[in-house]
Amino acid sequence: MNSQEWEQAVPQAITGDVLWKVKAYRLALFAADLGWRDVTKLAQNKRTVDLSNQLYRSLGSISANIAEGYSRNSNKDRARFYEYALGSARESRDWYYKGRHILGEIVTAPRLNLTTETIRLLLVMVPDQRRQTLKEEIVVYETVME
């Protein structure tokens, strides 16, 4: 299944939300859906059960943190959650690399590309939010003692 076919199958409850316009979010949801099959395959091998759990957790964390960050009203808070998503995307890529012996190159290569693309988008989103952070003006506070 490619991302366009997948997007057509996503419920309107998700696609109707303004968050759907964030490409990194769409890619993260797609990666999590694809990852379900991969995690299931990794869980069947007793040597990679723990790896499958880590992969499942990290893939789900990417879109969850993007959604959480998007819901924040301060750019500083958004940037923080986007950084968490970035960490989870990097972690997912790492777990995919470690699972490549079980999953095979035909599965692993596109997953590495998908997580790398998500990382690239987040590497733009985080500093963009940081630049927009409202800075407090320097004010001299005086107290009058009577």
Image: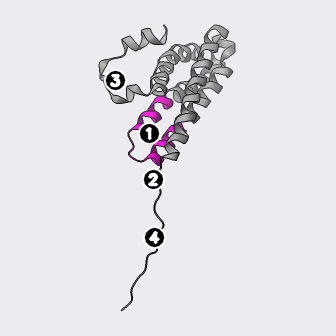
Looking at the rendered structure, the kind of residue marked 2 is Leu
Whichever of labels 4 and 2 marks the residue nearer the N terminus, that label is 2
**Residue range corresponding to the magenta coloring:** 60-84
Disc 1 to disc 3, how far (Cα)? Answer: 16 Å
Characterize the local packing of mark 4: few (<14), some (14-19) or many (20 or more) Cα atoms within 10 angstroms: few
Of labels 4 and 3, the one closer to you: 4
Residue that numbered label 3 is attached to: 14
Residue that numbered label 2 is attached to: 134
- Relative placement, left or right, of 113 versus 63 is right
Question: Any mark on residue 139, and which?
Answer: 4
Whichever of labels 4 and 3 marks the residue nearer the N terminus, that label is 3
Question: Any mark on residue 69, and which?
Answer: 1
Give percent across and percent down for residue 85.
52, 34
Whichever of labels 4 and 1 marks the residue nearer the N terminus, that label is 1
To which quarter of the image does residue 100 belong?
top right
Identify the element where label 1 is drawn.
Answer: helix
Looking at the rendered structure, the kind of residue marked 1 is Gly
